[in-house]
Image (tube, grey):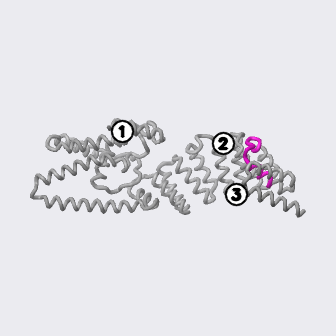
Amino acid sequence: MTIASSVITVFVQKKGGAMVSLQSLSIESRLLNVVTSYAGYVRKTVWPTDLAVFYPYLDPSMLELTASALVMLTLTVAALWLRRSAPYVLMGWCWFIGTLVPVIQVVQVGVAPMADRYMYVPVIGLFIIVAWGWADLSEKWRSLRSVFIVAAVVVTLTFAMYTWRQLGYWRDSFTLYEHAINVTRYNYVAYNNYGQALMKAGLVDEAITQFSEGLKVMPFSDQINYNMWLALSRKGRIDEANTYLMKSAPLWFGGDKATLYKHMAIDLLNQKNYREAIDYFLMSALNNNKDAELFRDLGAALSALKRYDQALVSLSKSISLDPTKWEPHYHKGLILKEIARYDEAEAEFKNALALSPNSQQIKIALNNLHRIREAK
């Protein structure tokens, strides 16, 4: 079952893009993390504190590594020693060890060395040991049966209390990721996700602080660099922001400079920073002059600066590259109306309407043009 589960896990994670290459983390580091992760799962089962939505990779200290190895070795020897008198111990221990193999990260199937959700099935093995062991001990020491009952109630109530408290951290993204930051170290994922939650709430300055903390840990993270760019852009710190966008390029554009420059230009256009938008549109066009959408948006930026002749050339280029889109015709119509070339404007509006017959936007522009001509 373990082998089959391992194969399925690797296949699914690879298809989903979750597997990490051998270059990401050395095999030596992975093997060391196997020891500390196994011991960590045992500790969190016995005493479930410091639980987090994400655990980052950390270099274990020699003390932590030694203690983890001793714990695992001791428990394994104990399971083997009790194999005849208490066979459920070995069975439960093998269940725990074996069912964790697919996600113990010898083959990396994610960016975290361990995750609470990986214990859904393996923890059954530890519970087998506890359940059968508790019944075994209470049977052997019948005189202490009442003590065992009280202890069971206390343990159950304690874990119920911890469960209730842990559920509170999942109330919303703010409490979830703030808690993860508080109980783990160097948790760049928590910093990033907390920052995103703050961004959605409109707390951009606070989000920038969180993204900055994440970048201290993982300065080349595509995702955090992109989010930092987005946050700084919203604050109007464009020059500073674009530095982070360049670092996030692999996430979105796979090294495609034309697309990168185009997206930077579109963001500047949306902020009405038309001059810089034009610069980036032109840099994009130098790398790819076959993008109809690019020339459409370049035309809109040029038009906003009243550079109408250049805007008309750009929009005509867009139409020649993709004659099926109504937007370039519409924008040409607006420019031609603005410079009082009404016949040409009407022709462009009609071309746009032919491509998008239900567009109220075009119909309104055409009606406005007719009123202007009648007034004259």
The number of callouts visible is: 3
User: Residue 206 at x, y = what percent?
Assistant: 52, 61
Q: Earlier in the sequence, mark 1 or mark 3?
A: 1
Q: Where residue 272 is drawn, which disc sits there?
A: 3
Q: Which quarter of the rendering shows the N terminus?
A: top left
> What stretch of residues is rendered in magenta?
318-334
Q: Amino acid at mark 3?
A: Lys
Q: Above or below — where is 78 with respect to 160?
A: above
Q: Are marks 1 and 3 in contact (CB under 8 Å)?
A: no
198 left or right of 344 in image: left
Query: In which quadrant of the rendered view does residue 231 lie?
Result: bottom right
Q: Which residue is mark 1?
A: 5
Q: Residue furthest front?
A: 358
Horizontal side, residue 51 vs residue 248: left or right? left
Residue 167 on image: x %, y %: 37, 60
Q: Secondary structure at mark 2?
A: helix
Residue positioned most to the left: 143
> What's under tag 2, amino acid-wise?
Ala
**Residue 156 percent coordinates (x, y):** 25, 59
- CA–CA distance between discs 1 and 3? 53 Å
Which residue shows up at 56% across the image and 50% down it?
226
Q: Residues within 10 Å of mark 1 (few under 14, many from 20)?
A: some
**Residue corresponding to mark 2:** 258
- The nearer-to-camera label among 1 and 2 is 1
Q: Which mark is residue 197?
A: none
